Image (cartoon, grey):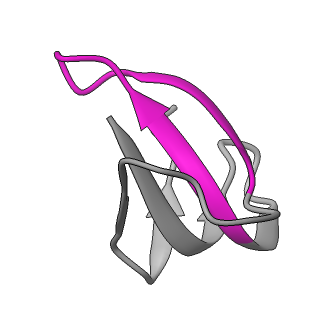
């Protein structure tokens, strides 16, 4: 699943300005993320800040 957020807070405490896409598997575990550069199909806009788990 792909969701879009305004920003992402990395596990080391770094806040990166987005927008960013966070991709998760069916279990909800993160499989990757990247900066949003153009519209991406099948992406849900959530907004706010995504906080990565340690």
Displayed quadrant of residue 24: top left
Residue 8: % across, % down: 64, 62
Residue 9 horizontal side relative to residue 54, left or right: right
- The residue depicted at 18 percent of the width and 17 percent of the height is 26
With respect to residue 47, does 22 lie above or below?
above
- The residue depicted at 75 percent of the width and 73 percent of the height is 18
- The residue depicted at 65 percent of the width and 42 percent of the height is 11
Q: How many marks?
A: 0
Q: Is residue 18 magenta?
A: no
Displayed quadrant of residue 7: bottom right
Q: Residue furthest left?
A: 27
**Residue bounds of the magenta highlight:** 19-35
Residue 28: % across, % down: 23, 27
- The N terminus appears in which quarter of the rendering? top left
Q: Is residue 32 magenta?
A: yes
Helix, strand or loop for the magenta stretch, by majority = strand
Q: Nearer the viewer, residue 30 or 1?
A: 1
Q: Nearer the viewer, residue 10 or 48?
A: 48
With respect to residue 8, does 7 lie above or below?
below
Q: Nearer the viewer, residue 44 or 10?
A: 44
Residue 17: % across, % down: 80, 77
Residue 29 horizontal side relative to residue 18, left or right: left
Residue 46 horizontal side relative to residue 54, left or right: left
């Amino acid at each position: 699943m792909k969701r879009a957020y305004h920003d992402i807070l990395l596990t080391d405490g770094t806040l990166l300005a987005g927008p960013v896409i966070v991709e998760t598997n069916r279990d909800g575990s993160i499989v990757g993320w990247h900066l949003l550069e153009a519209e991406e199909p099948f992406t849900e806009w959530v907004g706010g800040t995504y906080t990565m788990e340690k």
